[in-house]
Structure formats: structure tokens, C-alpha cells
Amino acid sequence: MKIKILILNIAVASLLAMVLNGCRKNQREVTDAEENTSFMAVFRHQGNTGKTGDPLASQVVNTNDMYLTWNGINGAAGYRLKMKVQSGSWDIPGDILWDTIVGPDVLKITKQDLQYSTKHNFAIQTLSPLGEAYHSKWYGLGDGSHNDDRAEWEMGERLGIPDVVAVGAVTETSMRVFLN
């Protein structure tokens, strides 16, 4: 009798193991690149901090200079930054107006003398010391469905240029030239 109960328990346990194993979700193996990819650096701005008027946020300064600041990533080898105007494409190398790499301790930079009254898009990528396969995804490229992943700012309008030379009191034989 004890042997029959033991055989029955083994059969039930085997059946239960097969059922539970069959119901388990298929788990895929995580690749080395996926497991060791660097975290994504993110520009600090209202879209991801929720703070308006944050003096430490990325922002336009001096009408056409762009102050960029981002979160630091522990263990990063550096950061790669890109810029284009809004009408350009990230996929066309000629549309990329600025592409630079900074060290891991650099967490802010000012890009000066940008085109007035134009929206500029910026992107950042964390560089991994393990190599290119381990760099983070780009932040700032936007994918159409995640507006907070778009990093764009419009430069201010150019102020009027003062007249240096003006002409007045014009007659047939003379004129007055005013130098300002």
C-alpha cells in the first residue's frame, strides 16, 4: 500500500511539474549588451523636472546662446551631444550642425551664437567605457509619441541693428551725412 501511495505521489508530482512548466511564460535570454548598456543621460528641463523657471534647467540665454545641463551617469566614459535645426533630420549627416564629445565630469555646456528665431534640437548619449555596443540610447531625438523625449528650444529674435550712417537734407547739390 505504501508503495502504491509513493508511486501515486511521484506521478502526481511529475504531472504537476509538467503542467506548471508548460504554463510558464517563455523567458528570453538577456544579452550582454542589454544587461550592460549605460543609463541614458537626460537634459534637465521642465518636461522632465516639472519645475517652471528652474535656474538650473537647460534654457536659452542671451537671446541666441543655449545653456545645456544634464544628469550625470556613474561610470560613464563621457557624453556625446548633437544639434540640428528643427527642419533638419537626425538621419542626414549634413543636417547635424554640431556633434561633440565631452568628458564624464562635464555636466553642462553653453553653445553660443545660434541662429536667431530658429528652433534647435539637441540630443545626448552616454558613452560606455565598455565600447560602442554598450552606449546608451539617445535622449532628445524624439520618436513622435514621447514629447518629453524631444529636446528643442527656440532662440530669441535678433534685436534691431542701429543705423550708423544716415543721410538727410538732400538737395540737388548737397546732402548731410549723419554718423551715429
Image (cartoon, rainbow, N blue to C red):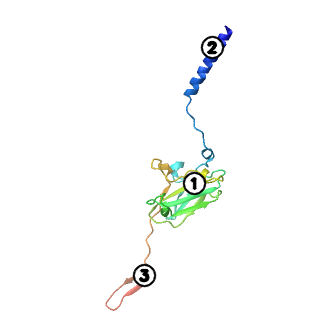
Residue type, numbered disc 1: Gln
Disc 1 to disc 2: CB gap under 8 Å: no
Q: Nearer the viewer, residue 38 or 140?
A: 38
In this rendering, the answer to whether 3 lies above or below 116 is: above
- Residue 64's label in the rendered image is none
How many C-alpha atoms fall within 10 Å of the one at disc 1: few (<14), some, or many (≥20)?
A: many
How many C-alpha atoms fall within 10 Å of the one at disc 3: few (<14), some, or many (≥20)?
A: few
The mark that comes first in sequence, 1 or 2, is: 2
Q: Mark 3 — residue?
A: 165
Residue 57 appears in the figure: no
C-alpha span from label 1 to label 3: 49 Å
Q: Nearer the viewer, residue 138 or 180?
A: 138
C-alpha span from label 1 to label 2: 60 Å
- Residue 125's label in the rendered image is 1
Q: Mark 2 — residue?
A: 8
Within the image, what quadrant is residue 101 found in? bottom right
Residue 47 in the image: state x and y as whole percent.
Answer: 50, 50
Residue occupying the far left of the picture: 172
Quadrant of the rendering where the N terminus is positioned: top right
Disc 2 to disc 3: CB gap under 8 Å: no
Look at the numbered disc 1 and give the secondary structure of its residue: strand
Residue type, numbered disc 2: Leu
Write the residue at 61% across / 21% down.
14
Residue 169 in the image: state x and y as whole percent.
Answer: 35, 85
Q: Nearer the viewer, residue 35 or 45?
A: 35
How many C-alpha atoms fall within 10 Å of the one at disc 2: few (<14), some, or many (≥20)?
A: few
Look at the numbered disc 3 and give the secondary structure of its residue: strand
Residue occupying the far top of the picture: 1
